[in-house]
Image (cartoon, rainbow, N blue to C red):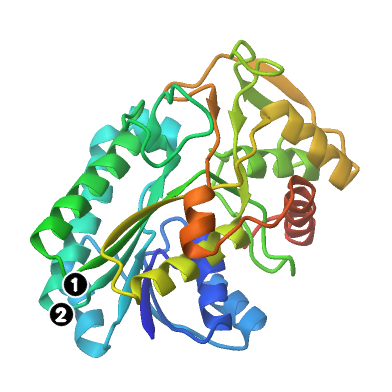
Amino acid sequence: MVVLVSGGMGYIGSHTTVELLNQGYEVIIVDDLSNSKDVVLDKIEIITGKLPKFYKMNILNEEDLETVFKENKIDAVIHFAAFKAVGESVSMPIEYYHNNLTTTLVMLKLMKKYSVKNFVFSSSATVYGEAKTMPVEEEAPLSTTNPYGATKLMIEDILRDVYKANKDMNIAILRYFNPVGAHKSGTIGENPSGIPNNLMPYITKVAIGELKVLSVFGNDYNTVDGTGVRDYIHVVDLAKGHIKALEKLSTNSGLVTYNLGTGNGYSVLELVKAFSKASGREISYKIVDRRPGDVGTCYADPKKANNELGWIAEKSIEEICEDSWRWQSNNPKGYN
């Protein structure tokens, strides 16, 4: 099977590409490298012994993207390419709506033109907004608290309409919780530009000495220690979930939606403590104001994915921290 992976050089995309190649899939990556580095391609080859075909392009450009469909017989698309920072989306809503919606529409248009029927969409737990009950099930009410989440929910709605109009499509909507960790080899990992928007790379950069102190956004939530609680899923477990989704689509599944999470919630300070233990480094932190768009608690009910996909998140919070530290200590400046 030939799989087109948009954003395949990014954090989740690169780990998913590794798992696809290891499972015998042929992979074509499309990425504009706006949030990734071209050296990732070499790293993927080091891990897998295989070099995926790579097109450097922005998929906002329909004409450029069409060359990929013309030159290859594509069986499925995994669509990662998107702007992805909650806080940034609050200050840059126009850019987020334009990029995330338009890239998806361009991809779907070309899939229709070239009769590509299988689509895996990278959604997010942010579509649950301020969920009233925990753990969150797929049938929970949908809403958003920030533009990033709104783009994911809008695209989900688009996909539901696309399926109604095209019943021969097979679409998997995967709602990620909080991806963390790195490949066990320490060869690829999370490599944000500038000040990280996500918690784990911020912690690792404090541990390595690149940043002085971790900012903890709020300690007055209704949680075990007042700090935000999230479901942290190892990025390799998450990547394997995409393989299971492709297998599901190959059975002509129609439209399916799954949470990809562990079912366990950890607070910010619990994660800091676990990372300190794994790394042997004390993590300096300070409490600052809550961040716009954040919710207090969010963790998954993953039973549907467990039962229907035969998928389960296997890696512990300790393993997550060990792999994150191995990546950061092996690559103190990331891919630079």
Residue 142 picture location, percent across and down: 32, 33
Residue 34 picture location, percent across and down: 41, 57
Label 1 secondary element:
helix
Residue 94 picture location, percent across and down: 23, 36
Q: Amino acid at mark 2?
A: Tyr
Q: Badge 2: few (under 14), some or many (20 or more) residues near its Cα, within 10 Å?
A: some
Q: Amino acid at mark 1?
A: Met
Disc 1, disc 2: CB below 8 Å? yes
Q: Which residue is outermost to the front? A: 307
| Cα distance between the residues tagged 1 and 2 | 5 Å
Along the viewing direction, whichever of 45 and 5 lies nearer the viewer: 5
Q: Is residue 160 left or right of residue 207?
A: left
Look at 71% across and 55% down and name the residue there. 315
Residue 313 appears anywhere in the view: yes
Q: Which residue is outermost to the right? A: 280
Quadrant containing the N terminus in the rendered view? bottom left
Along the viewing direction, whichever of 315 and 179 lies nearer the viewer: 315
Residue of label 1? 111
Look at 44% across and 38% down and name the residue there. 137
Quadrant containing the C terminus in the rendered view? bottom right
Residue 262 picture location, percent across and down: 61, 46
Q: Is residue 320 above or below residue 196?
A: below
Q: Is residue 255 above or below residue 265?
A: below
Residue 37 appears anywhere in the view: no
Along the viewing direction, whichever of 142 and 254 lies nearer the viewer: 254
Label 2 secondary element:
loop
Residue 114, label in figure:
2
Q: Kindly indicate the quadrant of the structure image that contains residue 330.
A: bottom right
